[in-house]
Image (spheres, helix red, strand yellow):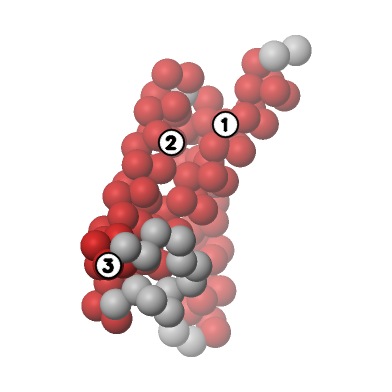
Amino acid sequence: MRRYELAANAIIHFPILLIFGIAIATAWPLNLWIVAFIYACGVIDLAYAKLPQIRQGILASFGPSLVPAERRSSYYRAYRRLGFAFGLHCLVLVHYFVVVTP
């Protein structure tokens, strides 16, 4: 991806993602289910990526070095999903503490 394509994608996608995040944060019962679903998808991906380690009895490992090469994409995708869910969860909490609570 070239530099101008990256800038164009950032300009086009950032407002869309921001509006999407705010729309989810303000829809009360739906936002909790969406955040929980994204967290669950991340945990399932992480369990799938670490399944060979769990079968070998390695329960505590950090980093992708012990994850098999064919499952590393799932490992990285799991942490991206968990990070996205955490950010969305923080956005929901800020919305509740700033807008709803006072």
Residue 18 % position (x, y)? 54, 46
Q: On the image, numbered disc 3 is attached to which residue?
A: 56
Q: Nearer the viewer, residue 78 or 16?
A: 78
Give the side of residue 34 with respect to residue 11, left or right: left
Q: CA distance from mark 1 to mark 2?
A: 9 Å
Give above or below for 87 relative to 94: below
Q: Nearer the viewer, residue 100 or 5?
A: 100
Give above or below for 38 relative to 66: above
Instruction: Assign the N terminus to one quadrant of the image.
Output: bottom left
Residue at (45, 61) in percent of width and height: 60
Q: On the image, numbered disc 1 is attached to which residue?
A: 92
Of labels 1 and 2, earlier in sequence is 2
Q: CA distance from mark 1 to mark 3?
A: 39 Å
Residue 35 % position (x, y)? 43, 36
Residue 90 % position (x, y)? 61, 38
Give above or below for 64 relative to 95: below
Residue projecting furthest to the top: 102
Identify the element where label 2 is drawn. helix
What mark, if any, has residue 13 been given in the picture?
none
Residue at (57, 31) in percent of width and height: 92
Give the side of residue 102 with respect to residue 81, left or right: right
- Disc nearest the viewer among 1 and 3: 3
Query: Quadrant location of residue 40?
Result: top left
Q: Nearer the viewer, residue 7 or 38?
A: 38
Residue 24 seen by the camera: yes
Residue at (34, 37) in percent of width and height: 37
What mark, if any, has residue 35 been given in the picture?
2
Residue projecting furthest to the bottom: 2
Identify the element where label 1 is drawn. helix
